Image (spheres, rainbow, N blue to C red):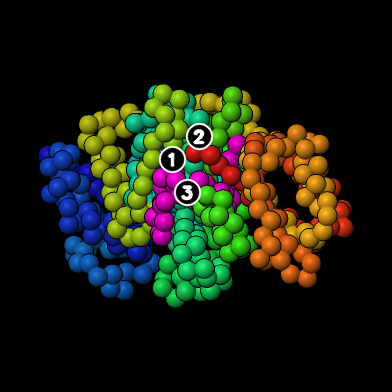
Amino acid sequence: MKEVKVGIIGFGTVGAGVAENLLLNKEVIAKRTGVNVTLTRIADLDITTDRGIAVPEGILTTDASVAIKECDIIVELVGGTTIAKKFILDAINAGKCVVTANKALLALHGKEIFDAAEKKGVDVYYEASVAGGIPIIKALREGLVSNRINRICGIMNGTCNYIITRMEREGADFNSVLADAQKLGYAEANPSLDIDGFDTAHKTAILAALAYGEWFGLDPVSIEGIRDLALDDIRYADELGYRIKLLATIKNNDGNVQFSVAPTLVAKNTLLANISEVFNGVLVDGDTVGQTLFYGRGAGRAATASAVVADITDVAINLAGGTVRRIPAFREGKLYDKVLAADEITSRYYLRFEVQDCPGVIASITRLLADRDISISSMIQDEAKGKNGNVPLVILTHEAPAKALKSALAEVATLSINQSPVKVMRIEDL
Ligand code: HSE
């Protein structure tokens, strides 16, 4: 049986999970693949802390270049976009195949990394970078390869989904649930990457690259997190038949593509709306297959290790069979016409106004919408929540151009009956 040597760089939580899985399931992997996948090196600056697993004598090193020199597959689990990039490029330039879970690095520097991999003829696989244990990248790259991708909608941040689920179920506000999530270890001490939408945006950029054949980076992704998510909006959405999710949306309308991350209303009776707690879900709509839905754990040591080791075995099979790059992990090839800017899209919208409760208020707002051909689909004026002569007014619209809505809301802002900034969220019909 051919042997393929694996070197892990980064012995943190995921690194330890990958090492554990490779050691524990070596026989399973060998029986399934016909390849002897051997954990040969683990590099980390800290090789003394006990990670709770017994690794073979002498494989730990503080020098990443030793792992790169001695191994066939380099598994980058350092994270970040500086030294991790150097390790990956060093490995590629040494002719080694790479497996990484580094979403930020790929989102920002994917082009450079995949250009280098193509030049050197090596594989770079990255299943764990999006939605943890869910094999969404393999699905897009292989299972759905014949499809034009109409749309991808993803709940891809477990921390945000957990916070929103608890706000919804307990009626607790954002800050108290976040504090609790931090205490329980679900949210980081600095939660910005998750709650401000950047983590989901990195994943969005990777799925967009796979869907449309280009590394777009973060620039065309409009990003809004859940920091300002109000309980009132969760309640009104519920009353109107919707749940709010931090949704990544990747869409293609006649060649015009758009990418966004934002709290978005999805109908309560859809599968995606019912993905709760820390779970992730990704809906892919292909022109041939129709809708498919992928569900599972998007984070955590074991789920992430499962995806990393799946990549390692794919690459090991390629190496053993002399078929490296048989299924390119990414291939440039433009599959769209134009990337739309945020104000060029059309969408359905949720609008919450705070208005004076007096004659003609609804008429004046709906007139401004009607003047721009924006049609209303539902409406609530919440008398019970009124105070000091003001009252919340919630309007759902049919599909409307973002520009038209912006112009209507700019005019609403000038009306004396309007009492505070309008809350705007998109609605995604699934
Ligand atoms: N922090 C992410 C989450 C997992 O909460 O889902 C890593 O991307």
Residue appearing at x 49%, y 42% in the figure: 153
Q: Amino acid at mark 3?
A: Lys
Say left or right for 106 vs 126.
right
Residue 138 to residue 384: above or below: above
Residue appearing at x 20%, y 46% in the figure: 37
Give the image location of residue 115, x and y in percent: 49, 35
Say left or right for 290 vs 398.
left
Q: Amino acid at mark 1?
A: Leu
Res 136 quadrant in image: top left
Q: Are marks 3 and 2 in contact (CB under 8 Å)?
A: no
Mark toward the start of the polypeptide (3 vs 2) = 2
**Disc marking residue 151:** 2
Q: Which residues are magenta?
A: 258-282
Say left or right for 78 vs 28.
right
Give the image location of residue 14, x and y in percent: 34, 59
Residue 259 can be seen, yes or no = yes
Q: Are marks 1 and 3 in contact (CB under 8 Å)?
A: no
Mark 3 closeness class: few <14, some 14–19, many ≥20 residues within 10 Å? some
Task: Let me know if residue 62 is in the magenta part.
Answer: no
- Residue holding disc 1: 283
Task: Measure the C-alpha gap from mark 1 to mark 3.
Answer: 15 Å
Q: Nearer the viewer, residue 15 or 234?
A: 234
Residue 51 to residue 207: above or below: below
Q: Are marks 1 and 2 in contact (CB under 8 Å)?
A: yes
Say left or right for 127 vs 413.
left
Give the image location of residue 384, x and y in percent: 66, 65
- Residue holding disc 3: 268
